[in-house]
Image: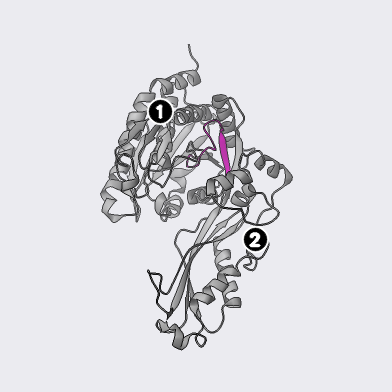
Amino acid sequence: MPEPRETAIAFARENRDRFLEELKALCAIPSISTSAEYKDEVRRAAEWVADHMRKIGLENVAVMDTPGHPVVYGDWLHASAEAPTVLIYGHYDVQPADPLDLWETPPFEPTVRGERIYARGATDMKGQVMASLNAVEAVLRSGGAPVNVKFFVEGEEEVGSVHLGDYIQANKDKLACTVALNPDTGMLAPDVPTITYALRGLVYFELKVFGPKSDLHSGVFGGVVHNPAQVIAELIAGMHDAEGRVTLPGFYDKVLPLDEAERAELARLPMTEAFYLEKSGAPALWGEKGYSPVERTGARPTLEINGLYSGFIGEGAKTVLPAYAMAKISCRLVPDQDPADVEAQLRAYLEANAPKTVTWELKVFPGPARASLSRIDSPGVQALAKAQETVWGKRPVFKREGGSVPVVGDIQNILGVDVVNTGFALPDDNLHAPNESLHLPTWYNGIDALTHFFFNLG
């Protein structure tokens, strides 16, 4: 008689065609969370996920309202008393599909071309949600599920997960677990199994500098009134020194250093200077001295200017001294930086450096996120590493991700458990861009790897 693991893997492989059709059905729902116009479609996607959970045998399934879009919950809690409980996160909302004219096929008419399925949300992250549900279904059909599972799938990730922290706090008992699984990361290549063990945090600001009460004639008032555009340019320029370090007071005080073993592990990644030059198209790289590019993008904090505006920016010439200037600023944070501390540091920098010839205001956007760090030697990470090695036939690489997934920090801080970050998105999947796609062979391997993960953990 086959072992449960063998039965589960066989089930997953025999049902790949059905899994693909179910993914198409979910991707056909335009669950764009950022637009009120699509609120009903977001709800429809939540209901679809809930129905699918019931179909595969999950229990206590509920579409739970929040002040924004709903969270879908479901569980299966019939493993032995000693078995671990895995909490699985996902999101069913997607980015807007604009610009529509750049799509080769309509974004909400999922289309398979070659080895890829093209649709908005295919890789970010409906494909990853379905891979997790597919693997759990395979485990449940094996007759020997070794772990308890809980799912919570949100509808606001693409707008900052602004209500998810409150949801987790209010449902701590419902979400209690041994380990959490976040499949919202990716792989470096189809043949490079990857585990992301760290994610950077984020805090986002809008800085406005005000001068005169209205725009002025630059010939009449230039040289007499301090130009807010010049002031904001000088303030921004001063936020980094010649070594590429951020100059906000105390910015690095809580940054955890990299030890030699971790630097050696990061050096295994195929993300050299040539990689970043090729992917970015920049003429040369820049950044904090003393660190490799892969360390700068994952293990060191940054401050970036995301947008600038002031005065006349239309076609032609207009000799104006602007009344104000504005900059959008984001800071990517690493353990153990606190977004509230960084806000205070930026305010201290502005108070010390902004001249008295202007006034300024600083706005902090909702949803700041703390960085997260998972132990590579934790049982969850090791169970996934073994699963990936089984499927791909090689040891995975371990990487830090430069981006942010706010829920990971919330899970660690509120529920107090390790988070295993995985996913099967690839660098050329065009997530958030036209012609978003998912590489199906990698996705199928991912379903197998998650199936092995549950057995390894149990």
Q: Residue furthest right?
A: 260
Image: magenta residue range: 183-197
Residue in the picture at 46% in, 71% down: 326
Q: Residue 374 versus residue 206: which sits nearer the camera? A: 206
Whether 18 is drawn above or below 399: the answer is above
SS category of the residue bearing label 1: helix
* Residue type pointed to by label 1: Glu
Q: Earlier in the sequence, mark 1 or mark 2?
A: 1
Circle 2 is placed at which residue position? 244
Q: Return the x and y of residue 112 as percentages of the image width and height.
A: 35, 31
- In the drawing, does residue 54 fall left or right of residue 228? left
On residue 137, the disc is 1
Q: What secondary structure characterizes most of the magenta part?
A: loop
Q: Mark yes or no: residue 205 visible.
A: yes
Q: Position of residue 434 (x, y in %)?
A: 38, 45
In the rendered structure, the answer to whether residue 125 lies left or right of residue 37 reads: right
